[in-house]
Image: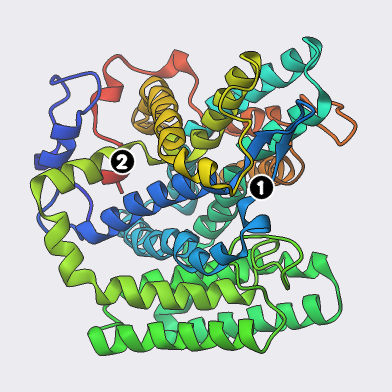
């Protein structure tokens, strides 16, 4: 992956915002399209997986219930070794962030300026979701929506924010972790795996759940290192890549077969140690497995991504990827809410039954259409206007990042409503206030006419 050259960018007078055709035309010849293909495919897998696993239904008493599919259909647990694609996101994130930070160093951009630019790209699409829940949660409570229902809806809709919080932290550490890779190479991966294993040993062995949360950084940060390895050619051929996959597979089989970990790589209670809450070393080995497989397939995937229609679809998804990711479960909440208003139409089927499975394609189509509508309305925020302000001192974007991550982590874990139905309407305002007060968002008064015409989005550094 490389950044766009000025000559390949659409002209400022061509449109208010670059179209998919503009972005396709702006693709540099040396861009690794497999990175974008994997990112786009992974987000679609995430959406389908979340929509499938949620198991939201109305019981015989007319109450809204959430019966996770993984809890009632244990045969689906091995499928999560494919459907849990967060390792792919961190793999391609490492690849892209290495390019971005090295480019910033070459241009003389400070860390503060670079981090603010990354925060703008990743958090500006988040702000409408925060505004949505800041308004909807108290309004729904005032209109008499049951507190338990509101809690289920908010927790389900805000699940994606945990990943964004962790990813923001990993991105912020890129200068440090990339320097570690450049100095130590594969020893940085081995060291990260050793520390992650030690954290699990203390957390699982000592029944200290809080200690395990350190592995959100050590596990995903180590998978992020694999992206550096890919970018720098440290996996030079199929033999090395398949060897990496073999290490991941053997490690997973041992941890699941001999160790205390569950088979499912997506969180589910009662089936061994939960692998995702908090992140466990099993996900690191899953990352090794997935990284080895997808990089071994890189030549075939590159030929596939080079097809004009495939690349146009890849560009389209990537240009709106944050909006799709952040809103696909709120789309589920909207559909469920409308269904409840109509007497629960479509929600009376018990998850896991034959009829329930038969209706999943229609369910996916309705949710996809709802998500597409939200993306159409909100997706342009993924192409923010250029920011001509001087680079800030690093403390400002770092403070914005920490405040945003703290707010997102609480909402992802607890939802907006407490167990007794009390609405914590202030929570969504934490990322909003942090973004404005600490300079991530540039206030409209200082925007210049036509700014949005410059190409941004995922083709930018």
Q: Pick out the residue farthest to the top.
A: 143
- Quadrant hosting residue 246: bottom left
Residue 82 visible here:
yes
Q: Between residue 172 and residue 294, name the one nearer to us.
A: 294
Q: Is residue 340 above or below residue 407?
A: above
Q: Is residue 310 left or right of residue 347?
A: left
Q: Between residue 123 and residue 61, name the one nearer to us.
A: 61
Q: Is residue 123 above or below residue 302?
A: above
- Crowd around label 1: few <14 · some 14–19 · many ≥20 (10 Å): some
Instruction: Give the SS element for disc 1.
Output: helix
Q: Is residue 138 above or below residue 163?
A: above
Residue drawn at 68 percent across, 29 percent down: 428
Q: Is residue 265 left or right of residue 313?
A: right
Q: Between residue 176 and residue 36, name the one nearer to us.
A: 36
| Quadrant, the N terminus | bottom left
Determine which of the numbered discs, if any, sits on residue 190 in the image. Answer: none
Mark 2 or mark 1, which has the lower sequence index?
A: 2
Q: Between residue 229 and residue 203, name the one nearer to us.
A: 203
Residue drawn at 57 percent across, 80 percent down: 192
Q: Choose mark 2 or mark 1, whichever is in front.
A: 2
Q: Report how far apart the C-alphas of labels 2 and 1 lie in the structure.
A: 28 Å
Q: Which residue is mark 1?
A: 402
Determine which of the numbered discs, if any, sits on residue 317 in the image. Answer: 2
Report x, y in % for residue 286: 50, 74
Report x, y in % for residue 64: 73, 31
Report x, y in % for residue 416: 75, 32
Residue 416 visible here:
no
Residue drawn at 73 percent across, 37 percent down: 65
Q: Is residue 363 left or right of residue 229?
A: right
Instruction: Give the SS element for disc 2.
Output: helix
């Amino acid at each position: 992956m490389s950044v766009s050259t000025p000559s390949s960018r659409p002209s400022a007078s061509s449109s208010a915002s670059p179209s998919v055709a503009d972005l396709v035309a702006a693709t540099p010849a040396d861009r690794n399209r497999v990175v974008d293909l994997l990112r786009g495919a992974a987000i679609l897998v995430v959406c389908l997986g979340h929509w499938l696993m949620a198991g939201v239904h109305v019981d015989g008493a007319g109450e809204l219930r959430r019966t996770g599919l993984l809890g009632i259909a244990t045969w689906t647990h091995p499928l999560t070794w494919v459907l849990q694609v967060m390792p792919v996101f961190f793999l391609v994130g490492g690849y892209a962030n290495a390019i971005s930070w090295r480019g910033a160093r070459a241009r003389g951009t400070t860390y503060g300026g670079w981090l603010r630019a990354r925060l703008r790209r990743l958090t500006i699409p988040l702000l409408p979701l925060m505004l949505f829940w800041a308004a909807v949660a108290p309004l729904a409570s005032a209109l008499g929506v049951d507190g338990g229902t509101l809690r289920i809806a908010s927790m389900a809709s805000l699940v994606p924010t945990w990943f964004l919080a962790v990813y923001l932290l990993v991105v912020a550490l890129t200068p440090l972790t990339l320097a570690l890779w450049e100095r130590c190479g594969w020893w940085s991966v081995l060291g990260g795996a050793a520390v992650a294993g030690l954290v699990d040993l203390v957390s699982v062995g000592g029944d200290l759940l809080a200690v395990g949360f350190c592995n959100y950084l050590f596990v995903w940060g180590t998978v992020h290192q694999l992206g550096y390895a890919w970018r720098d050619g440290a996996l030079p051929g199929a033999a090395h890549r398949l060897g990496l996959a073999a290490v991941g597979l053997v490690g997973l089989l041992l941890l699941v077969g001999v160790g205390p970990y569950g088979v499912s790589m997506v969180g589910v209670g009662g089936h061994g140690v939960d692998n995702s809450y908090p992140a466990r070393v099993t996900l690191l080995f899953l990352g090794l497995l997935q990284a080895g497989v997808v990089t071994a397939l890189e030549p075939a995937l590159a030929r596939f991504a080079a097809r004009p229609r495939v690349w146009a679809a890849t560009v389209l998804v990537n240009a709106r990827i944050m909006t799709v990711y952040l809103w696909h479960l709120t789309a589920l909440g909207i559909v469920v809410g409308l269904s409840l208003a109509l007497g629960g139409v479509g929600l009376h089927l018990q998850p896991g039954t034959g009829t329930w499975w038969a209706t999943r394609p229609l369910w996916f189509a309705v949710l996809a259409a709802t998500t597409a509508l939200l993306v159409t309305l909100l997706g342009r925020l993924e192409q923010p206007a250029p920011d001509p302000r001087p680079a800030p001192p690093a403390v400002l974007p770092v403070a914005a990042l920490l405040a945003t991550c703290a707010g997102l982590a609480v909402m992802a874990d607890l939802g907006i409503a407490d167990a007794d139905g009390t609405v914590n309407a202030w929570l969504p305002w934490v990322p909003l206030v942090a973004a404005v007060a600490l300079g991530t968002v540039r206030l409209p008064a200082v925007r210049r006419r036509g700014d949005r015409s410059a190409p941004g989005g995922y083709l930018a550094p």
